Structures are given as structure tokens and as C-alpha cells.
Image (tube, rainbow, N blue to C red):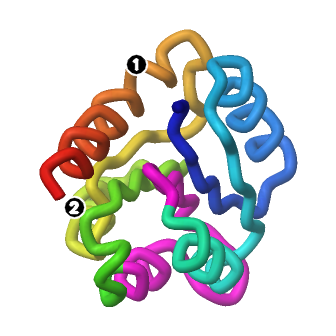
Amino acid sequence: MKAKILYIEDNEQNLYLITFILNKKGYEVLQARDGQEGINMAIHNKPDLILLDIQLPSMDGYSVARTMRTYPDLEKTPIIALTSYAMGGDREKSLDAGCTGYIEKPISPETFLTQIEPYLRDSAAEAGEK
């Protein structure tokens, strides 16, 4: 069974591109367009991986990650910050907020899957331990 991935992104072009790449590989993709919708979808759908934009309307990605980490069902779910924030310290700020990893946009369609799949393997291995 292929993994379920939640992508929280407000930019339609980014949402389309990432969803297309993931669907082509056979992943189930859930989409949320703002932080609160993403939190709600994560709680109810328990995805295997969460891709999280940092620049979201009303609630930034750092707040979303911190909030998700307060839910026992989500505390071990990999959250990857997928962002155009590329200033010094942004990676650390994402990790401090509870993200597991950090990928800068624009993504490379050729290498994107190899960047996220290790997090999916780790998630699957951890689920097998339960």
C-alpha cells in the first residue's frame, strides 16, 4: 500500500506540481490550503508524511508544526518544511518548530522523490515497531 501524504500549501502552482509528482509515483495526496485545514486533515487522516509550506495565510508553518506536535497521533509523523525561505537560520527555525526535515523551493522534479522517500521509509519502519 502506498503512503498517504498531506501537502499544506496555499500556492496553486506549487500544489499542482507536487501533487502531480506524488500521484505519478502512486502516492495518495491530501491537500490543505491553510494551516488550520492542514491540522484538521492531519488529525483525521493520520498521513504517513506531511509536506508543509512555511508561508501560509493566517497561521504560518512554524505554528502549524508546533501545534501538530501536541497531538499524540502526530508527534512522530515526519513533517518536511517545503519552503522558499532560504535565509540563514530558517532550516534551524523549522526544525526547532517540530519539522523533521527541510527542502527549499523551487524543488527539482528530478530529485524531489529521492529527498522525501527516506522520511517515508523511516515512518513505515516506526509504524512496524508499534
Which amino acid, by three-letter code, is at mark 2?
Glu
Q: Position of residue 90 (x, y in %)?
A: 33, 60
The residue segment tinted magenta is 47-68
Q: Position of residue 51 (x, y in %)?
A: 52, 52
Nearer the observer, 22 or 33: 22
Residue linked to disc 2: 92
**What's the CA distance linking mark 2 and mark 1?**
22 Å
Count up the numbered dots.
2
Question: Going by the picture, which residue comes out furthest to the left?
Answer: 129
Q: Find residue 37 and report its image quarter.
A: bottom right
Q: Classify mark 1: residues with Cα within 10 Å, few (<14), some (14-19) or many (20+).
A: few
> In the rendered image of this protein, does residue 97 appear above or below residue 112?
below
Q: Secondary structure at mark 2?
A: helix
Q: Classify mark 2: residues with Cα within 10 Å, few (<14), some (14-19) or many (20+).
A: few
Residue linked to disc 1: 114
Nearer the observer, 3 or 1: 1
Q: Find residue 59 and report its image quarter.
A: bottom right
Q: Does residue 35 belong to the magenta stretch?
A: no
Q: Position of residue 57 (x, y in %)?
A: 72, 80
> In the rendered image of this protein, does residue 70 appear above or below residue 128?
below
Q: Position of residue 128 (x, y in %)?
A: 21, 45
Foreground mark, 2 or 1, reads 1
Which amino acid, by three-letter code, is at mark 1?
Thr
Q: Find residue 18 and report its image quarter.
A: top right
Pointers 2 and 1 in contact (C-beta within 8 Å): no
Residue drawn at the location 75% of the way across and 42% of the way down: 14
Image quadrant holding the C terminus, namely: bottom left
